[in-house]
């Protein structure tokens, strides 16, 4: 079956670091995406991992372990504008179907 | 201007009505998708299309139909709307290459009374 798990909610303080975890069990794997979604708005692309390891993009980093079916999104130097939902999505094989399976998202609240 | 445009942005209608949601894009992407988003359920794929002649059902296609009028236009229809189709609907596009993400429109908030 297909299953993607993320914590429902997290809170953190401005300036801190937060790690949002995602575990997945899918019938195949061909890449994992992280999206940010502010309330009532469109999801916007943050990062993509297909090989094991860490991808860094400014304040945001994403890690993947394919053998463990695990990813995390790391947000550093948190700002109030980082308050949003963060969606983990897995693309199954074959990659040219380009279908994404989304987790239910993690709502992050950043406090002053 | 937005690369992926959805119309209308909000719609309130009654049970049994026929509704069409439209999506147009200027990104030049071949692949287009329709999702719905419900609280606690995440984004679920309704239909997707890889070109004008290609239409595929997604996870939850019952009660919906689509039309790919041109490379840039992909519309979603609810033939006879029911209250449990109340949701936030998103259109997305992608170039279909390995590391390329899907790009989402701003969404249509649909309420069926």
Image (tube, grey):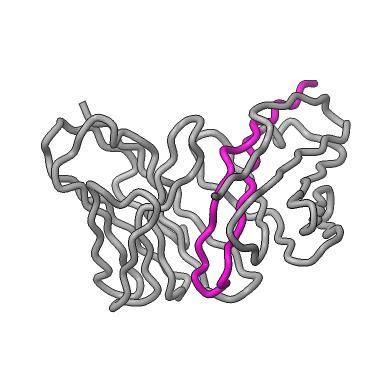
Q: Residue at x 36, y 69 (%)?
A: B49
Residue B98 vs A101, above or below: the answer is: below
Q: Residue at x 30, y 37 (%)?
A: B110
Judging depth in this view, the residue of B63 and B99 nearest the camera is B63
Judging depth in this view, the residue of A37 and B87 nearest the camera is B87
> Which quarter shows the C terminus of chain B?
top left
Residue B51 position by quadrant: bottom left
Q: Residue furthest top?
A: A112
Judging depth in this view, the residue of B22 and B48 nearest the camera is B48
Q: Residue at x 24, y 30 (%)?
A: B83
Magenta region: which residues?
A: A84-112
Judge whether residue B1 can be spotted in this image: no
Judge whether residue B35 can be spotted in this image: yes
Residue B46 position within the rendered picture, expressed as x and y whole percent measured from the top left? 36, 53
Residue A56 falls left or right of residue B65: right
Residue A75 position by quadrant: top right
Q: Residue at x 36, y 36 (%)?
A: B87
Residue A82 position within the rendered picture, expressed as x and y whole percent measured from the top left? 72, 36
């Amino acid at each position: 079956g297909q299953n993607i798990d993320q914590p429902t909610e997290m809170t953190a303080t401005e300036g801190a670091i937060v790690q949002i975890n995602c575990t997945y069990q899918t019938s195949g794997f061909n890449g994992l995406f992280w999206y940010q979604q502010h309330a009532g708005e469109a999801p916007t692309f943050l990062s993509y991992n297909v090989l094991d390891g860490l991808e860094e993009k400014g304040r945001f980093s994403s890690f993947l372990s394919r053998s463990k079916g695990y990813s995390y999104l790391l947000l550093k130097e948190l700002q109030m504008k980082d308050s949003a939902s963060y969606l983990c999505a897995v693309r199954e094989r074959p990659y040219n179907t380009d279908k994404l399976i989304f987790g239910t998202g993690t709502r992050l609240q950043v406090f002053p | 201007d937005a690369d992926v445009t959805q119309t209308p942005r909000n719609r309130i209608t009654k049970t049994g009505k026929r509704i069409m949601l439209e999506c147009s894009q200027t990104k030049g992407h071949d692949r287009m998708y329709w999702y719905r988003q419900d609280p606690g359920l995440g984004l679920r794929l309704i239909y997707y299309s890889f070109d004008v002649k290609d239409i595929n059902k997604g996870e939850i296609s019952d009660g919906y139909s689509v039309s790919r009028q041109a490379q840039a236009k992909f519309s979603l229809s609810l033939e006879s709307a029911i209250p449990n189709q109340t949701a936030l609907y998103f259109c997305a596009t992608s170039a279909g290459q390995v590391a390329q993400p899907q790009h989402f429109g701003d969404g249509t908030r649909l309420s069926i009374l």
